[in-house]
C-alpha cells in the first residue's frame, strides 16, 4: 500500500526562527519593519505589489484548529491521522467515517467567521499594497473577507462537495441537510452536542473531557462512535444518468430506498472539494498560484510553517525570482534560513522581515499605521482638527455593514 510511503511532513517542531531585523521582536518594531518592507521598491524589473501566502495559523483566531500550532491538531491529538485520498476514493467504510465526522464538525465550521487578520488583508488591498492571496486554508475566509482581492485556494474548499465522476459541485449546506435526513440518530446526537456546548468550547482539554476531539478542517472525532452506521447520498446528476467510466463500461450508481449510496456503486461518489492528503493539486490551480507569485514583487507569508511542499515551493519560487520575503508565524518555518541568507545585516525590513508577533494583533495595527500618514496629511489641510478625524475616516458606513453581513 502506498500509505506506508507517505509520511505527514514536519509533525514535530521546527527550530525557532531568527527575528529579522532584531527590532521586529516587539509589536512597534515589527510594524515599522513591515512598513519598510511594503514601501521599499522591490529589485528592478519586479512589480511593486505584494502577494500573500497563508495557512491554518491565520484562522486560529476564528476558533479553528490548525495543524502545527501550540494547540494544533498534531500536537493536541497525537494519534490524529488524516484520511488519505486513495482511501476515500476506494473505501465505502472510509467515506462513512469521513462524512460522519465532517457532519459533526460542519455546524461549528460554517458558523465561524473571518477574523481581523483576514480583514487587514482586505485593507492592505485597499491601500494598494496587496494584489493577490494564495491560501492553503479550506475555510473560505479569504474570499469572504476580501472578495475584491483574487484568492487562489491551493487545497480547495469545504464549502462544496464535488462528484469524483462528473465533477459537478454541490453546496455543503445542502449536502449537510441531506446527511441529517439520512442519519436521524446522528442528527439528534449533533443537536445534543451543540446544546451541551461540547462543540463550542475553545479549550481542547475541555472538549476531550466531553468526549469530543475537534481537529483541523472541520473534523470531529467521537471516540467509539459507530461510524459504520453513517449514510451518505449519491451525486444527483450521476444517479439520474449513470455516466460511462474511463474503461468504457457504464458506471454503477445505486442507492437504497432513502437515497443513501449502496457500497456496490463505483461512480457518483461525492467528496469534499478539497485536496486530500496523498492527492495532487490540479494543474489549473498550480498555474494560478505560480502566476500570483510571478505577478508580484514581494511575498508576505503568514500563519503557516510551509510544511506542505505545495506551499513551500511557492516561497522558493518567490525567492528564486529575487522577491523580498516577510514571514509572520509563531514558531519555525520549513527551510526559512534560505529566505533570509543574502540580506544586508543592517537592513531594517526592506529586504526581508521575520517576526513571531501574532497576526491578529500585528495586522490591524500595521494597517492603522499605514493609513496614518494619509490621515495626517489630510488633517493638515483642515483648520477644525477634530480629534476623531482618523477614526471617522476609517468608518465608512457601507464598509461596516459589509463586515456585519459577511
Ligand atoms: Zn456526478
Image (cartoon, rainbow, N blue to C red):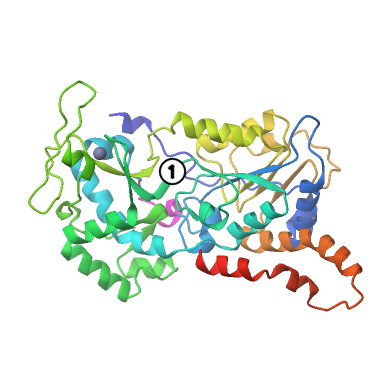
Indicate whether residue 79 is drawn in magenta: yes
Residue ID for mark 1: 156
Residue drawn 35% across and 50% down? 79
Observer able to see residue 305: yes
Residue drawn 43% across and 51% down? 74
Q: Nearest the camera: 107 or 122? A: 122
Q: Nearest the camera: 17 or 276? A: 276
- In the rendered image, which quarter is residue 312 located in? top right
Instruction: Please state the horizontal and vertical placement of residue 43, each as a whole percent of the image.
Output: 80, 33
Indicate whether residue 96 is drawn in magenta: no
Depicted 344 relative to depicted 220: above or below: above
Depicted 199 relative to depicted 252: above or below: below
Task: Indicate yes or no: mark 1 CB to ligand 1 under 8 Å.
Answer: no
Q: What element carries label 1?
A: strand
Depicted 156 relative to depicted 182: above or below: above
**Which quadrant is the N terminus positioned in?**
top left
Left or right of 51 on screen, residue 93: left
Observer able to see residue 223: no
> Ligand 1 sits in which quadrant?
top left
Dot 1 surroundings within 10 Å: few (below 14), some, or many (20 or more)? many
Q: Nearest the camera: 381 or 198? A: 381
Instruction: Please state the horizontal and vertical placement of residue 340, each as a whole percent of the image.
Output: 73, 38
Residue drawn 55% across and 35% down? 289
Instruction: Please state the horizontal and vertical placement of residue 351, each as a whole percent of the image.
Output: 78, 40
Left or right of 93 on screen, residue 58: right
Q: Which range of residues does the magenta coloring cover?
A: 73-81
Instruction: Please state the horizontal and vertical placement of residue 105, each as a whole percent of the image.
Output: 34, 59
Left or right of 83 on screen, residue 400: right
Number of residue marks: 1
Amino acid at each position: 500500500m502506498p500509505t506506508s510511503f507517505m509520511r505527514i511532513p514536519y509533525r514535530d517542531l521546527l527550530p525557532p526562527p531568527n527575528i529579522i531585523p532584531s527590532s521586529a521582536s516587539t509589536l512597534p518594531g515589527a510594524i515599522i519593519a513591515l512598513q519598510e518592507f511594503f514601501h521599499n521598491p522591490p529589485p528592478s524589473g519586479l512589480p511593486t505589489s505584494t502577494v500573500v501566502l497563508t495557512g491554518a495559523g491565520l484562522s486560529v483566531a476564528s476558533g479553528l484548529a490548525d495543524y502545527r500550532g501550540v494547540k494544533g491538531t498534531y500536537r493536541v491529538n497525537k494519534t490524529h491521522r488524516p484520511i488519505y485520498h486513495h482511501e476515500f476514493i476506494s473505501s465505502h467504510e472510509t467515506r462513512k467515517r469521513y462524512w460522519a465526522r465532517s457532519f459533526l464538525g460542519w455546524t461549528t465550521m460554517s458558523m465561524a467567521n473571518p477574523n481581523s487578520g483576514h480583514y487587514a488583508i482586505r485593507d492592505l488591498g485597499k491601500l494598494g499594497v496587496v494584489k493577490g492571496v494564495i491560501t492553503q486554508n479550506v475555510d473560505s475566509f479569504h474570499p469572504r473577507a476580501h472578495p475584491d482581492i483574487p484568492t487562489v485556494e491551493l487545497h480547495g474548499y469545504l464549502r462544496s462537495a464535488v462528484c469524483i465522476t462528473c465533477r459537478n459541485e454541490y453546496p455543503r449546506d445542502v449536502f449537510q441537510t441531506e446527511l441529517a435526513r439520512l442519519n436521524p440518530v446522528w442528527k439528534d446526537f449533533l443537536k445534543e452536542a451543540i446544546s451541551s456546548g461540547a462543540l463550542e468550547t475553545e479549550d481542547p482539554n475541555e472538549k476531550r473531557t466531553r468526549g469530543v476531539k475537534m481537529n483541523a478542517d472541520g473534523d470531529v472525532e467521537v471516540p467509539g462512535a459507530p461510524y459504520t452506521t453513517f449514510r451518505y447520498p449519491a451525486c444527483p446528476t450521476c444517479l439520474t444518468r449513470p455516466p460511462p467510466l474511463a474503461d468504457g463500461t457504464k458506471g454503477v450508481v445505486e442507492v437504497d430506498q432513502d437515497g443513501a449510496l449502496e457500497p456496490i456503486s463505483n461512480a457518483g461518489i461525492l467528496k469534499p472539494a478539497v485536496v486530500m492528503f496523498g492527492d495532487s493539486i490540479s494543474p489549473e490551480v498550480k498555474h494560478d498560484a505560480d502566476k500570483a507569485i510571478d505577478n508580484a514583487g514581494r511575498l508576505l507569508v503568514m500563519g503557516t510553517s510551509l510544511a506542505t511542499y505545495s506551499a513551500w515551493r511557492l516561497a522558493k519560487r518567490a525567492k528564486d525570482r529575487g522577491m523580498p520575503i516577510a514571514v509572520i508565524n509563531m514558531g519555525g518555518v520549513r527551510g526559512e534560513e534560505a529566505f533570509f541568507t543574502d540580506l544586508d545585516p543592517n537592513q531594517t525590513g526592506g529586504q526581508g522581515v521575520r517576526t513571531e508577533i501574532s497576526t491578529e494583533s500585528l495586522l490591524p495595527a500595521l494597517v492603522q499605521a499605514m493609513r496614518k500618514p494619509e490621515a495626517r496629511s489630510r488633517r493638515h489641510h483642515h483648520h477644525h482638527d477634530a480629534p476623531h478625524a482618523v477614526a471617522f475616516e476609517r468608518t465608512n458606513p457601507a464598509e461596516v455593514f459589509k463586515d456585519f453581513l459577511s
